Amino acid sequence: MYERYAEVYDESGQIGFSLRMLEYLDRVLERFPAPGLSMLDLACGTGTVALAFAQRGWEVYGVDASESMLQRARAKAAQMGQFLSLSRQDMRDLVLPRPVALVTCLYDSLNYMLSRPDVTRVLQRVSRALLPDGLLVFDLNTRYALEQLWGNNCFFSEGKNLATVMDSSWDHARELSTVHAVGFVRQQDGLYERFDEEHVEAAFGDREVRAALSDAGLVVEAAFECFSFDPPLSDSSRLLWVARKAGNP
């Protein structure tokens, strides 16, 4: 996943989510301060959020499973003259050289963990990577979004140099959403080159998320309808979770 798509990820409009999230994160961190200026952006993608924090003087690590996405992040960092510590890792086996004050995991990246044990394993690794009182901020697509909004639908978008078709299906028995993404990228000669990727996300309910956080030694501080500070509703499509690692006794 996110191999060929990485080349056009920002151009496709996905960067808009990260820019909107940055403004929201500022407000979240005002309410729930991190105990320092070091952070990990887990599933950092092309590095938009990681670079923004680095420019503010934070010590920043970025981890992603896609080498293509990391290449884009490195290129953006070099262009900006900004240092980032980037590494390719499976988030289930996350290792950092030192603990950090804040971990972010954004744009429904945890939905790509397809079982509760995998989510718990990631959160346990995150807990190890956090300082005492360290903060975890992540968002998840809800079951309502994956089943009702994505469902069995087909979505089309077209830009200057990219057209995409997203064919979505919902497996009720397994509670999995599968999106077959087909992209057409304009080349220098004006012709289009096609790529295909498949993205699968799992739905996790409130009790499952809270249990996984508890199993990892993380205490829930809040859950909001994403981009607001309103409580979740039955038809919320994306939730933002805030959790904290217990401090030293």
Image: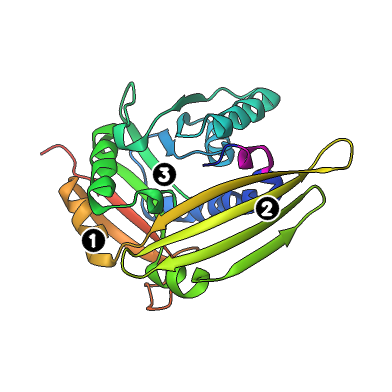
Label located before the other in sequence (1 or 3): 3
Magenta span has 5?
Answer: yes
Among all residues in the image, which is located at the extreme left?
Answer: 249
Q: Which mark is residue 13?
A: 2
Residue at the spot 56% in from the left edge and 22% down from the top edge: 83
- Frontmost residue, 135 versus 138: 138
Residue 2's image quarter? top right
Q: Amino acid at mark 3?
A: Thr
Q: CA distance from mark 1 to mark 3?
A: 19 Å
SS of the residue at dot 1? helix
Residue 50 in the magenta stretch? The answer is: no
With 191 as the anchor, is 46 left or right in this view? Answer: left
The percent coordinates of residue 95 (x first, y second) are 31, 27
Q: Which residue is mark 1?
A: 208
- Front in this rendered view, residue 178 or 139: 178
- Residues rendered magenta in the picture: 4-8
Give the quarter of the image for residue 248.
Answer: top left
Q: Secondary structure at mark 3?
A: strand
